[in-house]
Structure formats: C-alpha cells, structure tokens
Image (spheres, grey):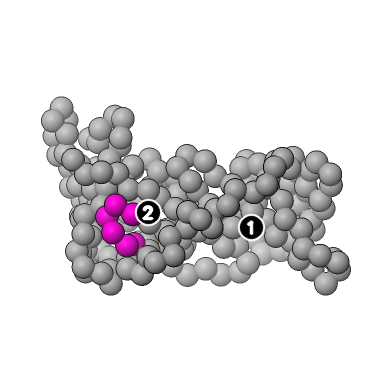
C-alpha cells in the first residue's frame, strides 16, 4: 500500500507465503517504490523477494530492484485515512490530469490552488488570480453527493494521478475541508493504491 501524505510518500510492503513462517513488514525507499509500481503495472510476473538485515531485493527475472530498508517503525498511516468519506466522485484520469495542468498555469505561484466545483455529472476546475486572470475547464464526472467546491494544490493532484494507470479515478469525499481519499476506480491484481490529499482553504 502506498500512502501519499503531503509531499512525502511511503510504501508498506507485506510479504506472505506458505513458504514463510510469518509475514514480513518493512519500509523501503520511494525510488524503489516508484520503479516497482511502474514495472508491475506493465508486466504480470512472479516476483522473488529477499529481505536482509538492511536491504530488500525484488527479482523479476530480467529486472532486479534493490532498496535499503528504512529504519524505525512504519508511520501509523491508518490514523490519517478518512473512514467516513462516502461521497464518490469518478472522473477520467486523463481528462482531470490535462484539465488540471492547463488551468494551473494561471494559479497562484505559492499555493497552486485549483477549485474543483463538483456537480452530479460535471466537475468545473476554476483558477482566479488578480495578477494572471481566470481559467476554467469542465470535465465529465459522476458524483453521489451534493454539489460542493473544494480547493486542491494542482501539483499534489498531478503527483497522485501520475502514480496511477487506471482509466478512471475515484475520489472519496466528505466535506470540503476534509481530506479526500484518491484511488483507481477499479483495481486489478495485487497492487493496491490509496492516496490522501488535503484540501486548501478557498479564498
């Protein structure tokens, strides 16, 4: 499971097999995480995992990934994953990535804020700054809640979406001032992703 918290990311890897007497839990570097996700999303293959005292390796026949193990306990990420986000927003990954990229050109240089005006069947992405003016993009969507406006840092949105290969993305929302859960609308295989993004105050 990969959890994005602000600009920091971690991978919690759990290895379990009938050949092991117990499961193994460890933290690895983000660079290894990125490569593992990228390769696993393209090829379906058996991965041989070897865990040493200070390192871990992933053997995929033609590709071998090594990573040092991060010291200390894994962060208690469960505490920051919202448990009551029941409003489902489904959007096209490519559509929201492209729209966010375009409107963010005019966003504030510090906050990179883009306001998502979410309706039942559409999401309007809005940017307004005194120096640069306004930008708007509308994309198709499906939303199970009441209409709401939420502000997000466009860079963080882009960072999250770049880690996912699914055609559709699911945002689980609660209130405009609460964190959102972001993940692929449908997940195949054993690779699971849950990302968290904090909203910005609209103003």
Pointer 1 residue = 40
Q: Give the residue displayed 45% in from the left and 42% down from the top.
A: 6
Q: What label sits on residue 179 in the rendered view?
A: 2
Q: CA distance from mark 2 to mark 1?
A: 28 Å
Residue 174 drawn in magenta: yes
Q: Quadrant of the C terminus?
A: top left
Q: Give the residue displayed 77% in from the left and 47% down from the top.
A: 56
Q: Position of residue 192 (x, y in %)?
A: 57, 62
Q: Which residues are magenta?
A: 173-179
Residue with the most extreme top position: 131
Q: Of marks 2 and 1, which one's residue comes earlier in the chain?
A: 1
Asked if residue 138 shows in the view, the reply is: no
The foreground one among 138 and 183 is 183
Q: Give the residue displayed 84% in from the left and 47% down from the top.
A: 52
Q: Residues within 10 Å of mark 1 (few under 14, many from 20)?
A: some
Q: Give the residue displayed 78% in from the left and 48% down from the top.
A: 57
């Amino acid at each position: 499971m990969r959890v994005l918290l602000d600009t920091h990311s971690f991978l919690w890897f759990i290895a379990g097999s009938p050949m092991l007497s117990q499961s193994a839990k460890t933290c690895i570097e983000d660079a290894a995480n990125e490569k593992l996700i990228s390769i696993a999303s393209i090829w379906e293959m058996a991965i041989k995992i070897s865990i040493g005292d200070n390192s871990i390796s992933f053997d995929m026949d033609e590709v071998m990934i090594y990573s040092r193990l991060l010291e200390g306990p894994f962060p208690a990420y469960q505490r920051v994953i919202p448990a009551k986000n029941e409003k489902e927003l489904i959007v096209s990954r490519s559509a929201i990535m492209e729209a966010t990229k375009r409107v963010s050109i005019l966003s504030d240089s510090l906050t990179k804020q883009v306001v998502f005006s979410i309706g039942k069947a559409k999401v309007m992405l809005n940017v307004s700054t005194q120096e640069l003016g306004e930008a708007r993009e509308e994309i198709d969507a499906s939303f199970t809640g009441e209409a709401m406006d939420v502000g997000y840092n466009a860079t963080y949105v882009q960072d999250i979406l770049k880690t996912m290969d699914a055609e559709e993305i699911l945002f689980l929302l609660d209130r405009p001032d609460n964190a959102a859960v972001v993940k692929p609308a449908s997940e195949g295989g054993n690779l699971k992703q849950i990302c968290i993004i904090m909203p910005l105050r609209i103003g």
